[in-house]
């Protein structure tokens, strides 16, 4: 049996995993054998998502904390330390969107998007990496980028800046932590059917544009990101570092 993609005995923390892409990542890694730790700010949503995974026979637990709050993140990792739980795999998935023309964009909204989509990956990634380095067994960090890690669109300037930053943050992390056996890579989803994109999916003009401009002629599904996440979480990617893999139906290929 090929065990390259087997995550049995590994523990994965997925931020923003009570729903959407994070929920798909959690299920995919759990099905590959990992113990998963779900995270979001809303404790009730986390508890519900954990119960769903446990009902399906998976090893799951929840930790509710705000990934933009450094003290809360530190406390969360300290709690895991106290439980004897070491994070082997981190997926920095937490993210928000705020659509607004730049000339009308408030600084507070810019900062909120940057903090949630970019700075949180630094805060959580730092705490995970410190422990991976101390244990000496390496680890995997996956940051979630976007098509906007590569190409801009109007009205989403802070999101575009954050996701471009995620690509380079991953490379900076790889540059510093590769020598410790830690691989840091980015997944760049295309237009995926998630809660964050509901307004766009329900917009006939935008929906038609996605279907016309994408070679696949459709939106992606959350579960279509699982294979890439499992690959980057597994031994199969032990010499892959600082890369971004776009899962976009070929959209970037035809720009």
Image (cartoon, rainbow, N blue to C red):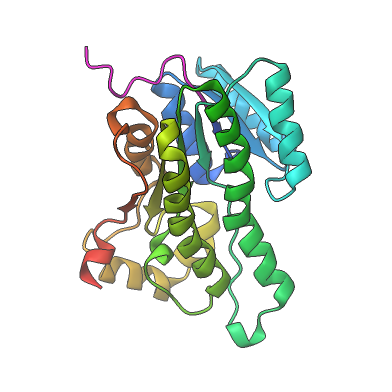
Residue 231 percent across, percent down from the top left: 32, 34
Residue drawn at x 57%, y 57% is: 118
Residue drawn at x 61%, y 38% is: 18
Residue 11 among magenta residues:
yes
Start-end of magenta stretch: 1-12
- The residue lying toward the viewer, choosing from 239 and 1, is 239
- The residue lying toward the viewer, choosing from 119 and 218, is 119
Considering only vertical position in the picture, is 112 above or below 61?
A: below
- The residue lying toward the viewer, choosing from 123 and 36, is 123
Residue 2 is drawn in which quadrant? top left
Residue 142 percent across, percent down from the top left: 45, 42
Residue 28 is drawn in which quadrant? top left
Residue 115 percent across, percent down from the top left: 65, 59
User: Residue placed farthest to the top in the image?
Assistant: 1
The quarter in which the C terminus is drawn is bottom left
- The residue lying toward the viewer, choosing from 44 and 128, is 128
Considering only vertical position in the picture, is 252 above or below 55?
A: below
Residue 142 among magenta residues:
no
| Residue 95 appears in the figure | yes
Residue drawn at x 41%, y 54% is: 192
Residue 44 percent across, percent down from the top left: 74, 35
Left or right, 74 with reference to 222: right
Considering only vertical position in the picture, is 5 above or below 142?
A: above
Q: Main secondary structure of the magenta part?
A: loop
Left or right, 240 with reference to 178: left
């Amino acid at each position: 049996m090929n065990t390259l993609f087997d995550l049995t005995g590994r523990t994965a923390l997925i931020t923003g995993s009570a729903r959407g892409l994070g929920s798909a990542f959690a299920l995919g890694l759990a099905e590959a054998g990992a113990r998963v730790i779900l995270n979001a700010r809303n404790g009730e949503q986390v508890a519900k998502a954990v119960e769903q995974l446990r009902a399906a026979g998976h090893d799951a637990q929840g930790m509710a904390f705000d990934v933009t709050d450094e003290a809360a993140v530190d406390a969360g990792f300290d709690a895991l330390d106290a439980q004897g739980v070491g994070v082997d795999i981190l997926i920095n998935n937490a993210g928000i969107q705020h659509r607004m023309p730049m000339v009308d964009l408030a600084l507070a909204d810019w900062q909120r998007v940057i903090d949630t989509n970019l700075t949180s990956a630094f805060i959580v990634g730092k705490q995970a990496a410190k422990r991976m380095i101390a244990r000496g067994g390496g680890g995997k960090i996956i940051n979630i980028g976007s098509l906007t890690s590569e190409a801009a669109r109007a009205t989403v300037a802070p999101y575009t800046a954050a996701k471009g930053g995620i690509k380079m943050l991953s490379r900076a992390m790889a540059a510093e932590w590769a020598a410790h056996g830690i691989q840091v890579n980015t997944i760049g989803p295309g237009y995926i059917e998630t809660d964050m994109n509901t307004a766009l999916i329900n917009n006939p003009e935008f929906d038609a544009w996605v279907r016309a401009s994408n070679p696949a002629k459709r939106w992606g599904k959350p579960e279509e990101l699982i294979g890439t996440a499992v690959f980057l979480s597994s031994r199969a990617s032990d010499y892959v570092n600082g890369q971004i893999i776009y899962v976009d139906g070929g959209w970037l290929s035809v720009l």
